[in-house]
Image (spheres, rainbow, N blue to C red):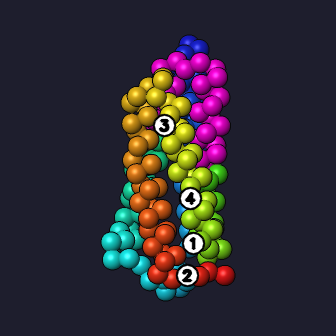
Amino acid sequence: MSTTDFLLQKHVLAAAAWVLVVAIAGGLATEVGAWYKALVQPPWKPPDWAFGVVWTCIFIASAFAWLEFWSRGPSTNQKSIVIVLFLLNGAFNILWSVLYFKLHRPDWSMIEAFFLWGSVAAIIVAMIPVSSVAAWLMVPYLVWVSIAMALNWETIRLNGPFA
């Protein structure tokens, strides 16, 4: 096996691990129980089943973005930045679910959502010099977080205050 093949396999495993950890941890933190079902939702909220479908597509696109970025031979500094940004993004993604679904604090999750949005935007900006394709693969994630923020805000407006 060549060094290039080994590095590619390493990045496939890293991208897969990031997706699995974030998706599983976020999923475990998402409890759609009585508290959630009692919330007044805006009429434009997507059906609950759509969230899993959308997140699956976003995580697949993010993994491909990761691999596309690495396939373009970024510098060590660029690699380090993107790795840190993906790790931060994963932490913010999971934290949002914990704040909203476990702690029942949409108000806190709204504040945290700005960090989540910023982490996705930062990944896009960091990827652009290396691969515009990788950056574009992350855009649906940014759009979805923007929609989620609007939904989060409407939840606060329709149901707050939270304590």
- Rounded to the nearest angstrom, the CA distance separating label 2 from label 3 is 33 Å
- Rounded to the nearest angstrom, the CA distance separating label 3 from label 4 is 17 Å
Q: Residue at x 61, y 80 (%)?
A: 162
**Residue type, label 4:** Ala
**Residue type, label 1:** Pro
Earlier-in-chain disc, 1 versus 2: 1
Earlier-in-chain disc, 4 versus 2: 4
- Tell me the mark number nearer the camera, choosing from 1 and 2: 2
The tally of labels here is 4
Mark sitting on residue 106: 1
User: Badge 4: few (under 14), some or many (20 or more) residues near its Cα, within 10 Å?
Assistant: many
Q: Position of residue 111 (x, y in %)?
A: 60, 62
Mark sitting on residue 151: none
Q: Quarter holding the N terminus?
A: top right
Q: Nearer the viewer, residue 5 or 149?
A: 149
Task: Assess whether mark 2 and mark 1 are in contact (beta carbons under 8 angstroms).
Answer: yes
Mark sitting on residue 160: 2
Q: Position of residue 146 (x, y in %)?
A: 44, 56
- Rounded to the nearest angstrom, the CA distance separating label 1 from label 2 is 9 Å
